[in-house]
Amino acid sequence: MQQLDKKSSAFRPIQLLKENKKLLKDDFLSGLTVALALIPESIAFAFVAGVSPILSLQTAVMIGFVASVFSGRPGMISSSTAAISVVFASLIATHGLEYLFATVVLMGLIQISIGLLKLGKYARIIPYPVMLGFLNGLSILIFLSQWDLFKTNSVSSVNGTEVVQSTWLPGPQIALMLFFVAFTMLIIHFVPKLTKAVPSSLIAIIVMTIIALGLGRFGIHLQNVQDFAGMEISGGLPRFHIPMVPINIETIQIIFPYAIIGGLVGLSEAVLTLQVIDEMTNTRGRTNKEIIAQGMANLVNGFFGGMGGDAMIGQSIINIKSGGRSRISGLVAASALMFFIMFGSAFINAIPLAGLVGVMFMVVVSTFKWESLRYRGKVPAQDILVILIVSVITIFADLATAVIVGVIVSALIFAWEKGKVIYANVEESEEEGKTYKINGTIFFGSVLNYKDIFDVTTDPDEVTLDLKYAKVSDYSAVEAISSLTKRYQEAGKNFRIIRLSEDCKRMFHNANAFTSITIEESEEELIQYPYV
């Protein structure tokens, strides 16, 4: 046995080396896949925000690299995003790029502060139906956004201002794209059945690029990245740049609202993406560390002339599905994207949009929680309502609003349902009068049902409230008990409360509900409750 143990321990380093090589290979190939998938998304976000495609691509590089270095959730991908683009679009149009850069710096500082204060723990209150609604809504949003790639963009000058106009491609070109979108999806679906050595999404993009170049020789043109951008995509490294804005109260008044909204929207998407990746990998990320990483990424990005960003659920899922598990995949994605911009422009410009749309459609298929369509009659109706509300708001408004509304609706539904679970066992005797033994939690959601339990008019002169099996949770409960006591005293009846827990006593004292407490010597603790 000792010899076997020595032999197995001798082979352990070799096994670890093989495992590390596989992990490194998977992270490298998945990062490369993500880099290619980021290109059209970043260009599209540039159009939304009203900045140049190169600026958006450089933002994706900087955000992705810094966030991966400091990440609390290895395997998660960060970049420029639609949510941040929408938030900053009006700021850019009104005040220009320098104010955008200053806002991104302030947004980063706000996010870092939130992480240092460890406020990420409040992400735990997000109910699972809100998560489902977020995933379903985001899936639909990703699906709808891909149809912009079936349009052609042209830049025209109107009163000296460049305006980007989008028009649908001719019918035959759309049909051709749809055919190759379906072909791409088939490649992604069936390649893993043959080999998992290389991510199927990467194989699909390479195969589609070769097909597009081959068809070009026969005069058949597939829309590619250059067509969508309306220009050749090439550039250099981002350069350090201090935002050229006046440092005064007026500047703060301009950029602070955008920084707050952008910061909260970004962190909402990052936290939810982290939770999705946690579930997919059966691991647990560090929320506060990730929040700080997002803040660091935006802070650095603002000083390198970027538009800001956050975590991307679609690209993160591509990364995880392709085998990316460590921060190396994020670093490779950012580095590869920068390499393509600087040296591989001919390749990325030739990538057909049909291949990239096919990749994103497969993300939609894997992200959407199809089982939620069968929830009717199997889960509470209120949970289905929350899923629908969050999904709709995610599509038509923004993620932060959807999550906030979802949490509020879930809390109100919980309070309503919890408030109905309160009742009393009533006992009557000639010696002790009438005793109400309350069962349940007395709080703002149940005080009305609590008050309906009592009948002050017909009750005898001696009434006892037994709270051994009840919990007094908030000041609404204290006020309800106080008002009930007053009603009994005004009716000339003696009302007493017995068997309070220590927490309940403390709450009454803190709320000044008692003027004095008398604890009688008996088999059980008896509290006289005089109302003054």
Image (cartoon, helix red, strand yellow):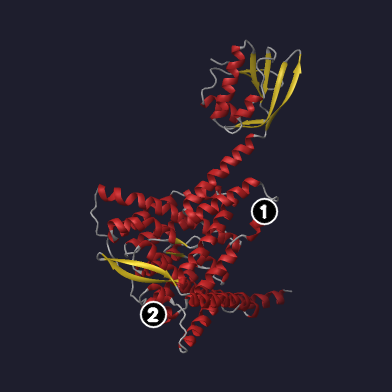
Figure check: 138 above or below 175? above
Say what secondary structure mark 2 lies in: helix
Q: Is residue 475 left or right of residue 82?
A: right
Q: Earlier in the sequence, mark 1 or mark 2?
A: 2
Q: Which residue is mark 2?
A: 345
Tell which of 5 and 201 is nearer to you. Answer: 201
Where in the figure is residue 83, as x and y percent of width and height?
A: 43, 58
Q: Is residue 301 left or right of residue 127?
A: left
Residue depicted at x 35% and y 49%: 257
Where in the figure is residue 256, as x and y percent of width and height?
A: 33, 50
In the rendered image, is residue 199 in sight? no
Instruction: Determine which quarter of the picture holds residue 10.
Output: bottom right
Where in the figure is residue 406, as x and y percent of width and height?
A: 54, 48
Q: Quadrant of the N terminus?
A: bottom right
Residue farthest right in this picture: 429
| Dot label at residue 483 | none
- Amino acid, disc 2: Ser
Instruction: Determine which quarter of the picture holds residue 498.
Output: top right
Q: Is residue 510 left or right of residue 522?
A: left
Q: Nearer the viewer, mark 1 or mark 2?
A: 1
Figure check: 340 above or below 75? below
In the rendered image, is residue 53 in sight? yes
Say what secondary structure mark 1 lies in: loop
Q: Which residue is mark 1?
A: 375
Where in the figure is residue 30, as x and y percent of width and height?
A: 52, 73
Residue farthest top in this picture: 492
Q: Is residue 212 left or right of residue 51?
A: right
Residue depicted at x 58% and y 16%: 486
Tell which of 339 and 113 is nearer to you. Answer: 339
- Amino acid, disc 1: Tyr
